[in-house]
Structure formats: C-alpha cells, structure tokens
Amino acid sequence: MAEMTSVGGTPFTGRALAGRVAMVTGAAGDIGRATAVRLASAGARVVLADLAEGLDATAELCAEANANATPITTNFDVTSEADVQQAFDDLADQGVVADLLFNNAGYQGHFSNVVDYEVDDFRQVLDVNVTGVFLVLRCFARTLINTGRPGAIVNTASMAHGGAPNMAAYSASKAAVIALTKTAAKDLADKSIRVNSISPAFIGPGQMWERQVELQAATPSQYFADDFDEVAAQMIAAVPLRRYGSLDEVAAAAHFLLSDEASYITAFDIEVSGGAV
Ligand SMILES: NC(=O)c1ccc[n+]([C@@H]2O[C@H](COP(=O)([O-])OP(=O)(O)OC[C@H]3O[C@@H](n4cnc5c(N)ncnc54)[C@H](O)[C@@H]3O)[C@@H](O)[C@H]2O)c1
C-alpha cells in the first residue's frame, strides 16, 4: 500500500493516539464506554471516570483493545468542585496528566411539557450537563496548562440543543454546552488546547434510546404517538438516513476531533445525526 504523504508539509499521523492520555467521563455509560475503547484502540492510555458502577467493565474492554491502555478508573460526581479537583489531584499523585478529554457525562432529565416541568429536575439537569462539564473542563485545562503541553477537549452536546419537545431542561443544557465549548475554545486557544463538541441525535441501541422512546410515548404531545414502536418509527422517519446512529459512529466523531487530524479545528460542533436537524 502506498504511504500517505502530505502536500502541505504537516506530517500525516492519522488518528494514532500513542503517548496520549485520554480522560473519558460517563465512561460507565454507552457512549463513554464505546469512545473509551476506541481511544484505547488508537493507542491512548485511558482514565475512566463516572459516578456509577461499571467502570471495571469498560477498563477490561480497553485493556483488551490495547495492552498499553493501562486504564485508570476514578469515581467522582462531576457536579462537585471538590470531588473533581480531588480526582485530578489523585491522578497527579500517580504522575498522570490527561491531555485529551472526552467530557461526556450527562443526565437526560424528566420528560414533561414545559408548563409542568419540575424546577428541581430542571436544576439537576443543568447542574450535571452544564456545571459538571464546566468543572471537569476547567480542572483539566488548569492541570494541562501547568505542564505547558497542548491538548484537546470534546464535550458531548446533543441535537436536542435545537429544542426537543418535552425536554426543556435537557435541550437548554445542551445549547449551553455548545456555547461553553465556543467560549472555552477561544479562551484556551493561546494554550494550544482545542475545544469542540459533538451533537448526537438518535443513537442506539442503548438505555438512552429506549428511555427517550418510552418517555416520549408516555408524555402527551402533538409530536409523538403513545405507543413505543410508533414513536420509534416517528423518530427514525425524522432522520434522512432513516436509522439511528451507532455508538461507534459517535465514538468516531469524538476520536477525530481529539486526534491531530483535527489540528486546525476548534470551537466547532459536529452533528452526528444522520442529517436530522
Ligand atoms: N445516547 C443518545 O442517544 C444521546 C444522544 C445525544 C446526546 N447524548 C449524550 O451523550 C452522553 C452520554 O450518554 P449515553 O447515551 O452514554 O448515556 P448513559 O446514561 O449510558 O451514560 C451517561 C453516564 O454519565 C454518568 N453520569 C451522570 N451523572 C453524572 C455525574 N453527576 N457525575 C459523573 N457521572 C455522571 C452516568 O452514571 C452514566 O454512566 C450524555 O451527555 C448524553 O446527554 C446521548
């Protein structure tokens, strides 16, 4: 096979991540796990973070994918400033500094018409999806800046940023993630830290797909039927590619943005949506 060469003078390194350390939050969940395994396969050492149980399973898959992945697992709540700081301090004590961050932990919230939406849940969604993303991003950036090394961040937003029915808090939180991404990209550009986001639409299989179909069916609206299969069909009909996306397709977008192949891309949101808007 012919070797890839560059015309512009930048050596072509592909998406290899050997020598990089990638932190993945929400790594016990579907998208976090798939992406962690992909980053490990590309050569990265992985730091797997979540509040929930399940990191060991992700760590095992990462180690199978790459014997050098030497996964580190860490349990913390992204909404706690102290816990986030402690997690980064613990890593530093082990001599580990992440230079890639997949900032992905998230909470979908309740499904309800905006007039009935409970304020406590609204606040919790914003706390996890916005404040949590901010706290991890800030701690990651501070730690990396101290080393003087470049890096990259991908935040997980969602196509709900355009305003999904019955999902007031989640939609608002994901629009905020995109705005936060753009500001952070500008603020960190002079430190050579790129910041981008991905916006998945309907992704499956997985608990989030099941949950949103079930809850849209159970929540009255003029947009969806009240039967699981019908709602699933309605959602897929709204996607030009006429299927939901796979976990691997989301992981591929995150991997691309974290890799040096995206070296001139910052402050950008990639829609992983099959054309759905
Ligand atoms: N699956 C989809 O269809 C879809 C579509 C668009 C966006 N997203 C986004 O992708 C991301 C991952 O979603 P997923 O589908 O893998 O869902 P998931 O529920 O499987 O994973 C989310 C993970 O985040 C963790 N988490 C939640 N709150 C936390 C907290 N306070 N501190 C630390 N960890 C916490 C959960 O424990 C869970 O493991 C989320 O940000 C979600 O909003 C998912």
Image (tube, rainbow, N blue to C red):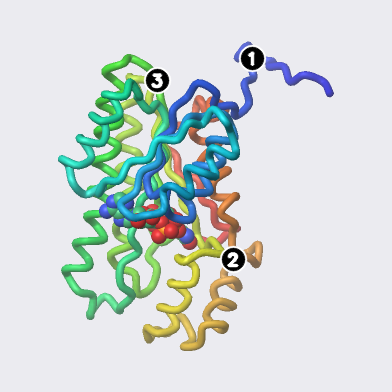
Residue 8, labelled with which disc?
1
The residue identified by callout 3 is 150
Quadrant of the image containing the N terminus: top right
The answer to which of marks 2 and 1 sits earlier in the sequence is 1
The answer to which of marks 2 and 3 sits earlier in the sequence is 3
- Looking at the rendered structure, the secondary structure element under dot 1 is loop
Q: Residue at x 39, y 47 (%)?
A: 104
Q: Residue at x 56, y 40 (%)?
A: 38
The residue identified by callout 2 is 239
Type of amino acid at the residue the image marks with label 1: Gly
Type of amino acid at the residue the image marks with label 2: Val
Q: Residue at x 59, y 39 (%)?
A: 64
- Using residue 153 as the reference point, say whether residue 62 is left or right of it: right
Q: Indicate yes or no: mark 2 CB to ligand 1 under 8 Å.
A: no
Residue toward you, 189 or 121: 121
Residue toward you, 103 or 21: 21
Q: Is residue 249 above or below residue 38?
A: below
Q: Residue at x 34, y 48 (%)?
A: 50
Rendered location of residue 258, percent (x, y): 49, 33
- Bin the neighbour count of mark 2 within 10 Å (Cα to Cα): few under 14, some 14-19, many 20 and up: some
Q: Is residue 7 above or below residue 265?
A: above
- Bin the neighbour count of mark 3 within 10 Å (Cα to Cα): few under 14, some 14-19, many 20 and up: some
Are circles 2 and 3 on residues that touch, CB within 8 Å? no
